[in-house]
Image (cartoon, rainbow, N blue to C red):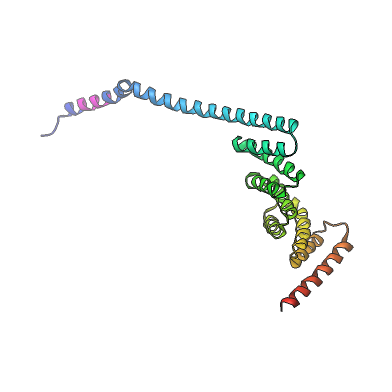
């Protein structure tokens, strides 16, 4: 048995009324959902404010340490601050750690600080930090590792840093006894036209090529 048109219309009206009643019937639940969304948005904004305040606090502590302490005492205080500071403040702290450690002759610790900055910083600062990392590795007697870092950097560094990277790579590769890599770096410098002492570069290339040939003969 089918419903009559009148009963169908009645059912439709009832369905519409039921739908209209839903927001009223469940207004508490709807309000609760809105409150949750607003609370989440407010909480996120509050968290952002908190993060900024924590970064400012860490930067103030950094300034106080640099002003009031020196030498090993400064380095120790900086390392302690780096462990508790928010991420947004750590690059500045690690740069100061690198500088302080270098001044103390602790090149291994300076290299570690430079490396930490290089892993998180934007492109320009990443390049500078990697150059610092390689320089301190070299001073720590780890020239081969420094060459590896500089070779990787030569692939990713912005064009403005190309000659600087090649200059450091040439000197570091020579110190590591990696003659051919030093030759390649000097040749890139010469080809790029970023030198003012072409005669010196030519002399270095000739010397290094002779050393590379002599090494190859010994191995054979």
The answer to whether 29 is drawn above or below residue 107 in the figure is: above
Q: Is residue 206 magenta?
A: no
Q: Where, quadrant-wise, is the C terminus in this rendering?
A: bottom right
Q: Nearer the viewer, residue 102 or 157?
A: 102
Residue 164 falls left or right of residue 25: right
Magenta stretch: residue 10 in it? Answer: yes
Q: Is residue 189 above or below residue 40?
A: below
**Image point 82% across, 66% down: which residue?**
205
Magenta residues (range)? 9-16
Q: How many marks?
A: 0
Q: Position of residue 194 (x, y in %)?
A: 82, 56
Task: Look at 79% across and 57% down and name the residue there.
Answer: 167
In the displayed structure image, the side of residue 39 where residue 123 appears, left or right: right
Left/right of residue 145 with respect to residue 25 in the rendered view: right
On the rendered image, what quadrant is the N terminus found in? top left
Depth check, front residue: 140 or 174? 140
Q: Nearer the viewer, residue 89 or 25?
A: 89
Q: Image quadrant of residue 28? A: top left
Q: Quadrant of residue 31?
A: top left
Q: Residue 127 appears at what percent x and percent y? A: 70, 49
Residue at the image point whose x is 68% and y is 56% from the top? 149
Q: Residue furthest front?
A: 72
**x, y percentage for residue 13?**
24, 24
Please name the predominant secondary structure of the magenta segment in the image.
helix
């Amino acid at each position: 048995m089918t419903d009559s048109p009148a009963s169908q219309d009645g059912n439709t009206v009832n369905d519409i009324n039921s739908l209209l009643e839903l927001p009223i019937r469940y207004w508490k639940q709807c309000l609760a959902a809105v409150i949750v969304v607003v609370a989440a948005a407010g909480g996120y904004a509050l968290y952002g404010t908190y993060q900024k305040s924590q970064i400012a606090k860490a930067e103030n502590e950094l300034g106080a340490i640099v002003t009031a302490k020196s030498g090993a005492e400064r380095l120790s205080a900086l390392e302690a601050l780096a462990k508790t500071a928010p991420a947004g403040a750590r690059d500045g702290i690690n740069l100061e750690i690198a500088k302080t450690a270098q001044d103390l002759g602790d090149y291994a610790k300076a290299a570690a600080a430079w490396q930490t900055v290089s892993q998180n910083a934007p492109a320009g600062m990443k390049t500078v930090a990697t150059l610092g990392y390689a320089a301190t590795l070299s001073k720590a007697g780890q020239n081969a590792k420094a060459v590896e870092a500089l070779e990787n950097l030569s692939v990713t560094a912005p064009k403005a840093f190309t000659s600087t990277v090649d200059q450091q790579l040439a000197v570091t590769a020579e110190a590591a006894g990696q003659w051919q890599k030093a030759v390649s770096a000097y040749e890139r410098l010469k080809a790029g036209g970023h030198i003012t002492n072409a005669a010196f570069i030519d002399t270095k290339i000739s010397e290094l090529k002779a050393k590379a040939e002599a090494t190859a003969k010994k191995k054979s």
